[in-house]
Image: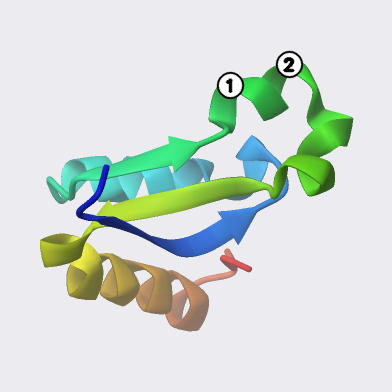
Amino acid sequence: MERYQTIAVFTYASEYTVLKHLLQQSGIRFVFQNETTIGILPFHSNAIGGIQLKVHEDDIPSAHQIIDDLNSSSHLRIV
């Protein structure tokens, strides 16, 4: 995990479902840290620091491009 960087933070898993699918399709190396914990204890999200999208440093530009495309070209917004 030392070559992974946090590029986004979400409160609930429902906020990034489409993004997760697009990252998988693109072959980007990523992990959503705290995903399971917040899935079980959703009201603890802010206390834990949210669900952090961590992306391998080599894939960060591609991941940012996917997020930007979602925010600019659709009704779906990644906060």
Q: Which residue is mark 2?
A: 40
Query: 55 left or right of 68?
Result: left
Tell me if label 1 and label 2 are in contact, CB under 8 Å.
Answer: yes
Question: Image height check: is 17 above or below 2?
Answer: above
- Give x and y (percent) for residue 67: 40, 69
- Give x and y (percent) for residue 28: 17, 50
User: What residue type is disc 1 on?
Assistant: Thr
User: What residue type is disc 2 on?
Assistant: Ile
Question: Image height check: is 18 above or below 38?
Answer: below
Q: Which residue is at 15% across, 51% downward?
A: 26
Q: On the rendered image, what quadrant is the C terminus found in? A: bottom right
Question: Which quarter of the figure has residue 70?
Answer: bottom left
Query: 62 left or right of 20?
Result: left
Viewer-side residue, 34 vs 65: 34
Question: Image height check: is 45 above or below 67?
Answer: above
Viewer-side residue, 58 vs 75: 58
Q: On the rendered image, what quadrant is the N terminus found in? A: top left
Question: Image height check: is 21 above or below 4?
Answer: above
View extreme (bottom): residue: 72
Question: Mark on residue 72?
Answer: none
Q: Which residue is at 23% across, 68% downward?
A: 60
Question: Which quarter of the figure has residue 38?
Answer: top right
Q: Which residue is mark 1?
A: 36
Q: How far is disc 1 from disc 2 in space, using C-alphas?
A: 6 Å
Colour pattern: rainbow
Question: Which quarter of the figure has residue 42?
Answer: top right
- Give x and y (percent) for residue 77: 59, 68
